[in-house]
Image (cartoon, rainbow, N blue to C red):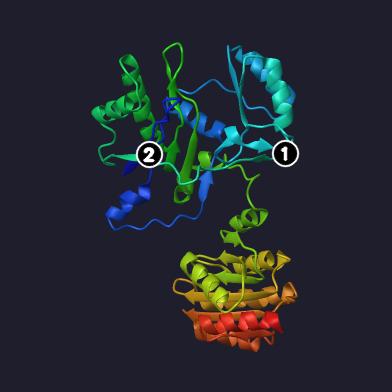
Amino acid sequence: MATSMASQAAARGLRTATSKRTFLHQFKCTLNPKRWLNLQEYQSKKLMQESGVTVQRFYVADTASEALEAAKRLNAKEIVLKAQILAGGRGKGVFDSGLKGGVHLTKDPVVVGELANKMLGFNLTTKQTPKGGVKVKTEVIDIFEGVHDDQALHMAANLGFKGPLQRQAADQIKRLYDLFLKVDATQVEVNPLGETPEGQVVCFDAKINFDDNAEFRQKAVFALNDMTESDPMEIEAAKWDLKYIGMDGNIACFVNGAGLAMATCDIIDLHGGKPANFLDLGGGVKERQVYEAFKLLTADPKVEAILVNIFGGIVNCAIIANGITKACRELELKVPLVVRLEGTNVHEAKRILTESGLPITAAEDLDDAARKAVAAIRK
């Protein structure tokens, strides 16, 4: 397990980015993530708070008046107002209201209300990272033993903490690592970890990403998922345990497996076509999923042809074929459909497609399928 820590020059920053996949790779195991869950900063801070990590007192406001009231309730010498979006670089971002900066510091609660009025309901554009990125140094942690006291103290010292603050910072580092394991995180990021004038070490920012394979045991965490910034097609696909990625071409790719999806997109491009999207069925597919997949693909106005490329290992090709014919009939498919099936029960699947009487173009292999899909658009 590797945990990277990078200090910021102006404020004693701490960035913790730990990858379970690195550890698993060393033991020749494979982790197949479905997608990454991202939480808003305030949600990440709430999880930290519940694990004994010190964070600022905070409120969440949906309106300018709520922001003003929250600022009054905080009764603090200084108040930080932060826009909550799933992107970095908020401090240097720009709202389409004209307001510059998604993070503002003020001592006046009235100003909080005025600023919130220019943030809420407006789009915030940011630059995620500086050109060339940021170089970090890695502190290796044994996943079986966890963070040792001397390691935590060493990291705290590297961040510039001294005296009693060093031990306090080390304690926060250990708590962050415990949180990392507790919630099945792929990354816990704090930038900065700093000290207050009163001598308290506090996490002033928070970002946590999660391993979606652990959704079954992290129900409370995944219930926090903010879908407002997600592609509606991806959201709908996820309801049926499908993975949808939109692109800018006109040939829809219906596949099983991310590797096959990328290969399909590449070979379409090789033959002069452009993928409009790819929709991954994964394994253990059911006929209803195939039907819902076709509904999603045909709902995209850019799609002028559909290429189905299924390699059946644990997937039964006959189930795919039945789903395809049902979708073609009930959705009254209007665009050309090219199908390449291979693997488990493929002969039965081909019989189902042939006897359906539907205008489905069969393909022998991936190259043949790509050629035919591109040619169908050019007719």
Q: Give the residue drawn at x 64%, y 46%.
A: 229
- Vertical placement of residue 156 versus 39, above or below: above
Residue 362 coordinates in the image, percent (x, y): 59, 86
Percent position of residue 59, x then y? 61, 24
- Inspect this view and state whether residue 51 appears: yes
Q: Is residue 129 left or right of residue 123?
A: left
Residue marked by disc 2 = 181
The type of residue carrying mark 2 is Leu
Task: Give the percent coordinates (x, y) of residue 285.
Answer: 53, 67
Q: Residue 159 lies in what quarter of the image?
A: top left
Give x and y (percent) for residue 165. Answer: 35, 17
Q: Disc 1 marks which residue?
A: 96
Rate crowding at label 2 as few (under 14), some (14 to 19) or many (20 or more) other CA atoms within 10 Å: some
Q: Secondary structure at mark 1?
A: loop
Residue at 73% in and 72% down:
331
Quadrant housing the C terminus: bottom right
Classed neighbour count for the residue bearing mark 1: other residues with Cα under 10 Å, few (<14), some (14–19), many (≥20): few
Q: CA distance from mark 2 to mark 1?
A: 39 Å
In the image, 71 versus 297, the foreground residue is 71
Left or right for 359, reference 136: right
What amino acid is at disc 1? Answer: Asp
Q: Nearer the viewer, residue 20 or 331?
A: 20
Q: Quadrant of the N terminus?
A: top left
Place residue 111 in its image quadrant. top right
